[in-house]
Amino acid sequence: MLEDQEKGISLSGKDLMPTKANEKNITSMGFLMLWIGIAVQLVTFVSAAQLYPALSPKNIILACILGNVIVAGLLTLIGDIGTKHGIPYAVVIRACFGYLGTHIPAFIRAIPAIFWFGFQTWMGAYALNVIMEMLTGYSNLTLLIIVFGAVQIINTAMGIEAITKFEWLASPSILVIGILMQVLIMKEHNMTFAGLFSLKGEGGVSFGYATVVMMGVYITMTLNAPDFTRFLKTKSSPNEKSWWKLNKGSFFGHTIGLVGSMLLFTLIGLTSGVATGNWNPIDVMVETMGKNSPLLLIVCLAFVILAQWSTNISANLLPPGYIIVNFFPRKISFAMGAIIAGIIGLLMQPWNYADYVPQILMVITATLAPIVGIMFTDYYLLRKRNLNVEELYRVNGQYKYWNNINPAALIAYIPSGLSVIFFPDYGFVSALIISIVLYYPLMKYWICKIYHQPEITGKFQEVQIQDIKHEV
C-alpha cells in the first residue's frame, strides 16, 4: 500500500489510485458512445453561429474539421497515460509540476470545465423553462437552473459506470434529433447546402482564429484524457510495447466520436445562424417550430436537455471532481468533489457571458496549450512513456523537485502563455511549440542533474530490477 510520508501533504486516496484490471470496464464501443455523448453539446452550435458572417460557412466547417482532428490526436496521445498506467490527470501532472505544483495546472484546467457546466446547465434549464411555459403557462428559470444542476451533479457523483450507461441512452437520441433539426431548419427557411456554402465571409476573423476557437471547445479534455482511458478495456496488456495496439480503441472513440459530432453540430449552428441571425439554439427552435409543430418543438427541446446533460456529467463535472479530490484526497471523495464543482459552476453564473463564446474559447485554448505541450514533452520525449507510478504517490519521492514544485514547468509555462498576446490567431501553436522548446532542455540539462529522474536518464529499468531483487 502506498502511504504518505510527510505531514501536511496528502497524495493518495481511493479515487486517485491506479485502476485495477477489473475496473477497466468501458468497451471500445462504450468509449465511442461516451465521446458522442460528450461532444454533442450546444457550445459548438453557438460558436459556429457567432463566427458567421465574419467567416464564410465553408471556412467555418474546415476550421471545425482541422481543429478537432488535432484535438482528437492529442486526446489519444495523452490518453495513453491512462491506458498504460491507469492514473488520472490530477496524479499524472505531478511528474511535470511536482507534488504541490500540480495544483497550478489542475486549477487552470478545472475553471473552464466548471464554467461550462454552469453555462450548459443554463441552456438545458432554458429549454426546460420553455417546455414548462408551453404546458403550464408558468415560468421560473432560476428554479430550473438549480434543479437541473442538482440532477446532473447527482448523476456524476454516482461514478463513471452511471455516466457511461447514461451516454448509451442519450447519444443515439441526440444524434437523431440533431439531424432532424438540421432538416427542419433548412426546410423552414428554404435553404440548400449549395446555397449555404456559396456564401462569402465579411472578414474580420481569420481562419486560424476560427480553428483555435473550434479547438477550444475540447482542448480542456486533452489534459484529462487519462481520467477516461484509465477505465477503457483493451485486449492488450498495459505492458504492450505497441502504442497502436494499446490505443486503437481510444483513437477511434476520440476521432469518430469527437470529430463527427462536432462537425454535425457546427453545421446545425451555422445553418441556424445564417437562416435566423440568432446564435441561441432554443430561440431558433421556438422560431422554427413553435407555431406549426409544438409537439415537435418539445421533442427538440428535450434533445437540448439531453445534450447538455450528457456533456456536463462527463466533460464538465468528472474532471474537476477528480481535481478537487487531489487537493484533499484523504478528506474528499469523488462524489463530494463533483458536488463542489457543480455548486461553484452555478454560482459563477456564466450565462451572463453568452455573447462572447468564441472569445472565451480563445482564452481557454491559450491558457491550456502550454500544459498540453509540457505533458507531451515530459511523457513522450523525456520519459519515453515510462512513469514511476509508485513515486507519484510518495511525498518524498523523485517528483518532489524544489519545495514540491518543478521550476522547469513554471518557467516553460509563463512565456508560452504570454506568446498568445503576440500571436492571438495562432496562440495554440505558438504556446505549444514554445512550451516544448523550453521544457525539454530545462528538464534534461538542469532539473535532472539536481533531482534524479531515472525514466529520463535511461536508468529506469535498472531501478525496476533493483526493486524486484529487493522485494525477493
Image: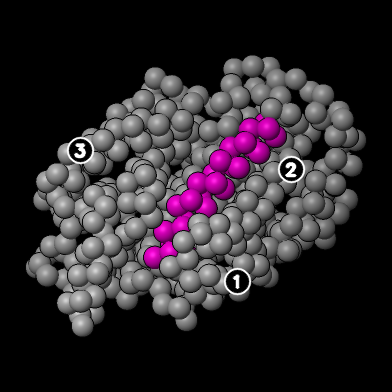
Within 10 angstroms of label 2, few (less than 14), some, or many (20 or more) residues?
many
Q: Main secondary structure of the magenta part?
A: helix
Segment colored magenta: 60-85
179 relative position to 260: left or right: right
394 relative position to 314: left or right: left
Disc 1 residue type?
A: Thr
Circle on res. 27: 1
Location of residue 233 by image quarter: bottom right
Residue pointed to by mark 3:
445
**What residue is at 74 percent from the left and 63 percent from the top?**
173
On the rendered image, what quadrant is the N terminus found in? bottom left
How far apart marks 3 and 2 lie (CA) works out to 50 Å
How far apart marks 1 and 2 lie (CA) works out to 30 Å
How far apart marks 1 and 3 lie (CA) works out to 42 Å
Residue pointed to by mark 2:
268
Label whose residue precedes the other's in the sequence (1 or 2): 1
- Residue 459 lies, with reference to residue 337, above or below; the image says above
Is there CB contact under 8 Å for labels 1 and 3? Answer: no
Give the secondary structure at mark 2. helix
Give the secondary structure at mark 1. loop
Disc 2 residue type?
A: Ile
